[in-house]
Amino acid sequence: MASPGWAVALMLFQLFHSGTSSPVFTKIPSLPPKIALPFPNVSLVPSPITPGESTQSVLCPLKISPSTVVVRFGDPVKANCSIQRMGYFGIGWEVPLNPPNFTWQGFVVWSVEKMTDWTIKPVCFALSEQGGPCYSNLTLIVYKPPDRVSITFLNHSESLFEGTLQCHVTEVAPAENVLVTFYRGEKMLAQMHLNTSSEKKPVTQSFTLNIVFSKEDTEAQYWCEAKLELGPEGPQHLPVMASQRLFAPQLSCPVELKVTEGKRFPCEVTGNPQPSVTWFKNGQIVAPPSHLNKKDAGNYTIQAKGLFPKNFTVEVKILPATGTANSCCGHFLLLVLLTQMITHV
């Protein structure tokens, strides 16, 4: 037969539960002394600690499995809460999303098909005849990979060979778990986390790195990548998102260029960011030729302003068109043939 204390605790729990229309369980309120005193078997003061026993195990012997859950926003999540120590009855979850019913069994499962709460803090609780209600928190991390990672070069000084790289990580959560790595070519320059961040919802963050470079470094590519570090409980193979690569202006053709007359001019200047390009011929600004003819032969100077400024010089030589050479050759052979025929007549 149930003890009087058990019956009183059940009655109080049903009273508090029926007084709210919300399906979300709230913490079992502490009873004022004037109400608790008539029921000596229902204690709201933690039991004394036995020597050699930890405070946590004595005050709340609840077990949550898994103890830490890492879930992507929109994915399902499940956790089990159980208690095996005698003297506790009734167990439930205090959680705003799909709370399970309070149960008199020794365990209760909280399950959600689609996690849609960034700041949720699930709490499992149990009722006791002697120790009062006890609580245990589930560590829940809701994450989202970044939408985009990009890089820019700020405060670039051509004369001092120094500047600032800035890596932008767009709409990522939680921000405190983001690790950003900067690269020059395939060489890692630095790694960094945010110092502090309590924001759990997706945010956009910028990470900056001051660098000093040599003249040789102007030929390298600069880029960054971002990844979420979610610990051993999280997914171990999350994709790493990389930015585009920054590189200085580059010329797509040889500096000594031979092009057949009538063909397209194959030279162009590429770079990221897209460079501003000016063409010169004989000291005059010109437009780069499209289809070449004999008058396009000569030396061209190209000024390109991009990640780093570059100057290029191209010597263009125009070769006779293939069709013209074949025609001349054909006429010559015909003339030889006719001469031979006349000679033999």
Image (spheres, grey):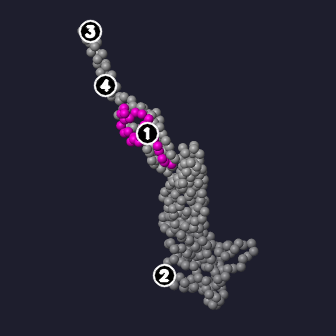
Q: Nearer the viewer, mark 2 or mark 3?
A: 3
Q: Could you give the CA–CA distance between mark 2 and mark 3, rounded to whole angstroms?
A: 121 Å
Secondary structure found at label 3: loop
- Crowd around label 2: few <14 · some 14–19 · many ≥20 (10 Å): few
Q: Can the viewer see residue 9?
A: yes
Task: Choose the circle earlier in sequence order: 3 or 4.
Answer: 4
Q: Could you give the CA–CA distance between mark 1 and mark 2, rounded to whole angstroms?
A: 85 Å
Image point 58% across, 65% down: which residue? 197
Image point 34% across, 25% down: which residue? 325
Which of 152/144 is in front?
152
Q: Nearer the viewer, mark 1 or mark 4?
A: 1
Quadrant placement of the C terminus: top left
Secondary structure found at label 2: loop
Q: Which residue is mark 2?
A: 21
Instruction: State if disc 2 and disc 1 touch (CB < 8 Å).
Output: no
Q: Which residue is mark 4?
A: 327
What's the amino acid at mark 1? Gly
Image point 60% across, 77% down: which residue? 126
Secondary structure found at label 4: helix
Task: Choose the circle earlier in sequence order: 2 or 3.
Answer: 2
Task: Choose the circle earlier in sequence order: 4 or 2.
Answer: 2
Report the magenta residues as a range. 280-307
What's the amino acid at mark 4? Ser
What's the amino acid at mark 3? His
Residue 284 within the magenta-colored segment of the rendering: yes
